[in-house]
Amino acid sequence: MANNASAAICRSLTEDIVSGKLPPGQKLEELVLAERFQVSRTPIREALRELAARGLIDLQPRKGGIVRSIGLSDLSDMLEAMVELEALCCRISAERMSAVQKKQLQMLQQQSEDCVARGDEAGYLELNHQFHQLIGAGAQNRTLTGVLDSLRERLAPFRAAQKKVERRLTVSHDEHQAVIAAIVASNAEASYEAMRNHTARLSINVLELLREQQAGEAAAAPAARPRRAAAAKPAAKAATRGRPRKTAA
């Protein structure tokens, strides 16, 4: 039960951090969080450890954590790696995937189409997970799929931030269709390109959304500064009266 509770808490806090609701520097105190989620401190600690492992907070032993600033450079590096690894996995799958697995892909695509028609986002995302897992299984390379699974887990909260992207389910479904067509035809290069285009678009959306968020935070920062900083300007001017002016070199 604690594991389920900690996972739910971790998801909730992750969404708050990625969306900016919990800004960089915000303290996450165990007692406060336990009160908020109406749980003991054990699942809170587990959730905070997971957030720290994902690089979203700095952990403070027996206290809680502090929200870290999301580094766009590091995030860009991870997204770039995932784009290439997903594409590589798809290329290998096109060469190794069995007829049964190919049929499973086509069935998943049909179910996904139904979800798009109904506007069932949760159902679509679950099928999307199965889609990528099946392609990973088709590659028959545990090292590659292990690295990919780890990257997907770390990037999941950032990719989930795409909720506001218009028509994203329809576009994703169409891109999946191109991937499946290439895999069914056993066309390794076409599979690579189709998956690369798919994951690259997702990555661009993630980076653009976070850039907009951080730009908004930066623009709002001056308004939050204490008034005494503005009041200090006249005093500074008075202190410099009578001094010789410096000229630019």
Image: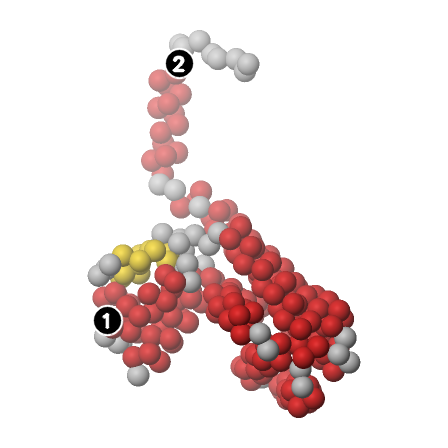
Instruction: Calculate the distance from the C-alpha at mark 1 to the C-alpha at mark 2.
Output: 58 Å
> Residue 66 in the image: x percent, y percent?
33, 56
What residue is shown at x 23% (from left), y 71% (from top)? 41
- Which residue is denoted by mark 2 in the rendering? 241
Q: Is the residue marked by circle 1 packed among few (<14), some (14-19), or many (20+) residues within 10 Å?
A: some
Q: Residues within 10 Å of mark 2 (few under 14, many from 20)?
A: few
Q: Is residue 200 visible?
A: yes
Q: Name the mark nearer the viewer: 1 or 2.
A: 1
Residue for point 44% across, 42% down: 222
Quadrant the N terminus occupies: bottom left
Amino acid type, mark 1: Arg
Residue type (three-letter) at the residue carrying disc 2 = Arg
User: Which residue is identified by label 1?
Assistant: 41
Q: Position of residue 107 (x, y in %)?
A: 66, 90
In-front residue for pair 57/37? 57
Q: Is residue 114 among what the camera can see?
A: no
Q: Look at 44% across and 46% down and name the residue there.
A: 221
The circle drawn on residue 100 is: none
Residue 74: percent from left, percent from top = 51, 53
Above or below: residue 77 compared with residue 16: above
Is 101 on the left or on the right of 75, as rendered? right
Asked if residue 107 lies left or right of residue 2, the reply is: right
